[in-house]
Image (cartoon, rainbow, N blue to C red):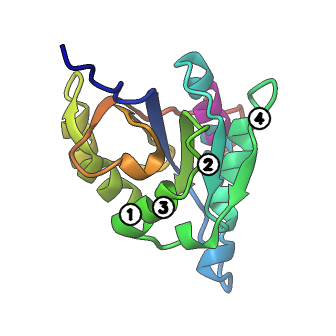
Amino acid sequence: MIARPAPGPLRRLVVLRHAKSAWPDGVADHERPLAPRGLRDAPAAGRALAEADCLPDLALCSTALRARQTWELASAQWGTPPPVRRDPRLYGADATELLDVVHEVSAEVETLLLVGHNPGLEELVLDLAGEDLDGALDEVRAKFPTSAIAVLAWHGPDWDALVPGTALLTTMLVPRGAKGHGKK
């Protein structure tokens, strides 16, 4: 009997699109803050990740203000947030560039959170998912809105082994925070 090596541990890539941003006059795109809806939705995303048992070992976050604010509000919902690396390469990145950044992550990380922007995040999810559960791929194809969360699961010895078509898209959800009284 030939012994086959184990395919590696179960790994999860959690993809979080930043929450709804504002468009203030005279503010550069990179410095756009969250809109009131984004300020409500980002904490809801953090709660949804905790409820789904998808808390990361490491977060990679775009340096854009709206992504940083999303991370801060989402991770504030957890007892002890994981380390975060703010990476300027995530701002405006396409799927190939995002995957290059993911490939650099240490093999010790089993659940990785990526906080960034469309269209790159949506393209990444669609590229990596070879299969899905409960029609999640159709949901991503239809729309990957602000605050959307996609969870991709796969087995591999390290992050460099993650290639297109090899992950299972297990979850696609869009958490929304409740409007407070008197807020628009």
Q: Residue at x 47, y 43 (%)?
A: 158
Marks 3 and 4, the one that precedes in the sequence: 4
Find the magenta span and give its range: 42-47
Is residue 33 visible in the rendered structure shown here? no
Instruction: Give SS at disc 1.
Output: helix
| Viewer-nearest of discs 2 and 1 | 1
**Is 54 above or below relative to 96?**
above
Which amino acid does the dot numbered 3 rest on? His
Residue corresponding to mark 2: 38
Could you tell me if the residues under marks 4 and 1 are in contact, i.e. CB atoms within 8 Å? Answer: no
Q: How would you rate the neighbour count of disc 2 (Cα within 10 Å): few for under 14, some for 14-19, many for 20 or more? A: many
Q: How far is the residue under mark 4 from the one under mark 1?
A: 25 Å
- In the image: residue 171, left or right of residue 137: right
Marks 2 and 4, the one that precedes in the sequence: 2
| Viewer-nearest of discs 2 and 4 | 4
Disc sitting over residue 120 in the figure: 1
